[in-house]
Image (spheres, helix red, strand yellow):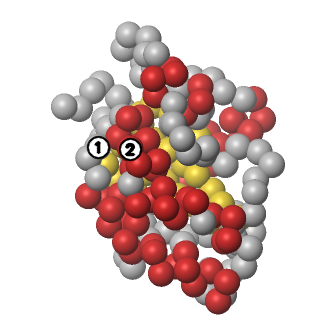
Amino acid sequence: MQGPCQLAQVNIARAHALIDDLLMAGFVARLDQINTLAESSPGFIWRLKTDEGNATAIQVYDDERILFNLSVWESPQHLRQFVYRSAHAEVMKQRKTWFERFGEAYMALWWIAPGHIPTIAEAKERLAYLQLNGESEFAFSFSSLFPAPGTAKQTRSALRPTAVNP
């Protein structure tokens, strides 16, 4: 059952090479499978994508090696299940092969009204805010999960991912 708010998430990654480079072939080979898995996962609502079905062609930053992912989920638990306990986790274990390590926040979460589709500008603002100001109700991560507006305070530790370090 859908609650009073939904969870938006943005994450970015800077690839070691352009998406069509041979170095990125293993990542590209898994894209359709992982995108299909996301869309069929419990709690999934929406994700940013082109007509081709993925977001790798959407250039959001001046650096064309930065990939941008934006999606909406019913709850943090649903997103966490997909990210850390599905085949997506297998891809994450290989991320050093394809992506550089970020020195700052690369993922931001925030609550939205049901039916709201976050814009790229909104997502960039939330991520930039988190990078500059740290965790708050405006933008947070799994490690400092803020409860949805109008809900009872949640136990943050119960919502943290386990065994896999984001």
Give the left or right position of residue 102, taking residue 143 as reference: right
Q: Position of residue 70 (x, y in %)?
A: 49, 53
Residue 76 in which image quadrant: top left
Quadrant that contains the C terminus: top right
Tell me the SS state at disc 2. Answer: helix
Q: Disc count in the image?
A: 2
Write down the quadrant of residue 125 in the picture.
top right
- Residue drawn at point x = 48 percent, y = 56 percent: 89
- Residue 41 falls left or right of residue 7: left
Residue 160, position as x, y percentages in the image:
51, 31
Q: Give the image location of residue 34, x and y in percent.
A: 40, 66
Q: Residue furthest top?
A: 152
Q: Residue furthest front?
A: 163
Mark drawn on residue 43: 1
**Residue at x 35% of width, y 40% of height:** 78
**For discs 2 and 1, the disc positioned in front in the rendered view:** 2
Query: Which residue appears at 62% of the width and 80% of the height?
Result: 24
Q: Which mark is residue 81?
A: 2
Label 1 Cα neighbours within 10 Å, binned few <14 / some 14-19 / many ≥20 = many
User: Is 44 left or right of 147, judged from the image as shown?
Assistant: left
Position of residue 37 relative to residue 104, above or below, is below
Question: Which one is earlier in the sequence, the residue at label 2 or at label 1?
Answer: 1
